[in-house]
């Protein structure tokens, strides 16, 4: 399985920002820390709970353009929901959490139909879990498990191919609470 990662604003460039003063390295970050801008389109995802960089009240709202502006990851994987391997594309869950300044122990995912599942926060750090916004390079309709689908790269590790990880893959995602 091949995982491809790209950043729409920095194609082909490194993603590290370094701050040097007086010849010493002071800070290394994945990308510059910025306040989360307000959603200008329809809100497709709300991140709440332990959020340090909200953009409306005490939550972070994301529209589809904001999710598309984050670095994108793509992979093809087999799932229990489709007969053939499918290609998923979207930002890493850890990048969405970082954009909202969210950190905790548990990630609670809630779908449009109020399905809820808890995932250990460490799963987002340890695995390349994505908030897929594209399926086979096309936006996902609600009837096709969209518009957002939290998906693990099941084919990357044998231990991910099981009921525990399948149950943590929430389709029709609408809300993330970090506890």
Image (cartoon, rainbow, N blue to C red):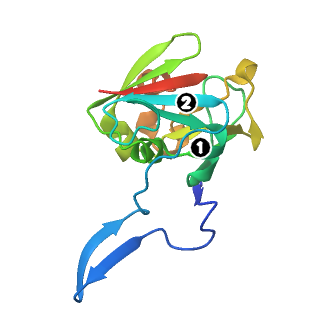
Q: Residues within 10 Å of mark 2 (few under 14, many from 20)?
A: many
Residue 75 percent across, percent down from the top left: 61, 47
- Toward the front, the furthest residue is 57
Question: Position of 51 compared to 83: left or right?
Answer: left
Whether residues under marks 1 and 2 lie with C-beta atoms below 8 angstroms apart, the answer is: yes
Label disc, if present, on residue 83 of the rendered structure: none
The residue positioned 40% from the left and 28% from the top of the image is 48
- Residue 163 lies, in percent from the top left, at 45, 21
Circle 1 crowding by C-alpha within 10 Å: few under 14, some 14–19, many from 20: many
Relative horizontal placement of residue 168, taking residue 179 as reference (left or right): right
In the image, residue 9 above or below residue 120: below
Task: Report helix, strand or loop for mark 2.
Answer: strand
Q: Quadrant of residue 26?
A: bottom left
On the rendered structure, is 105 left or right of 129?
left
Q: Residue at 32%, 40% (x, y): give it.
A: 52
In depth, the one of 123 and 173 nearer the eye is 173
* Residue 170 in view: no
Image quarter in which the C terminus is found: top left
- Tell me where residue 125 appears, x and y as whole percent: 36, 45
Helix, strand or loop for disc 1: helix
The answer to whether residue 47 shows anywhere in this view is: yes
Query: Which residue is disc 1 drawn over?
Result: 67
Numbered marks: total: 2
Residue at 54% of width from left, 41% of height from top?
A: 38
What residue did someone put label 2 on?
45
Location of residue 119 by image quarter = top left
State whether residue 84 is above or below residue 81.
Answer: below
Task: Kindly identify the residue that appears in the image at 42 percent across and 63 percent down.
Answer: 32
Instruction: Estimate the spatial distance between the alpha carbons at disc 1 and disc 2, rounded to whole Å.
Output: 9 Å
Q: Mark 2 or mark 1, which is nearer the start of the sequence?
A: 2
Q: Position of residue 35 (x, y in %)?
A: 43, 50
């Amino acid at each position: 399985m091949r995982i491809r990662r790209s950043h729409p604003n920095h194609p082909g460039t490194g993603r590290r920002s370094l701050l040097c003063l007086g010849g010493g390295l002071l800070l290394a970050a994945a990308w510059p820390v910025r306040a989360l801008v307000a959603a200008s389109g329809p809100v497709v995802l709300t991140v709440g709970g332990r959020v340090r960089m909200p953009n409306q009240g005490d939550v972070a709202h994301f529209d589809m353009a904001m999710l598309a502006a984050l670095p994108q990851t793509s992979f093809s994987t087999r799932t229990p929901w489709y007969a053939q391997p499918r290609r998923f594309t979207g930002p890493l869950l850890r990048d969405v959490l970082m954009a909202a300044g969210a950190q905790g122990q548990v990630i609670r995912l809630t779908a449009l139909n109020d399905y809820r599942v808890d995932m250990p926060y460490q799963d987002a750090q340890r695995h390349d879990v994505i908030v897929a916004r594209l399926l086979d390079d096309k936006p996902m309709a609600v009837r096709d498990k969209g518009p957002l689908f939290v998906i693990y790269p099941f084919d990357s590790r044998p231990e991910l191919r099981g009921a525990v990880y399948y149950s943590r893959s929430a389709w029709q995602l609408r809300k993330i609470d970090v506890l």
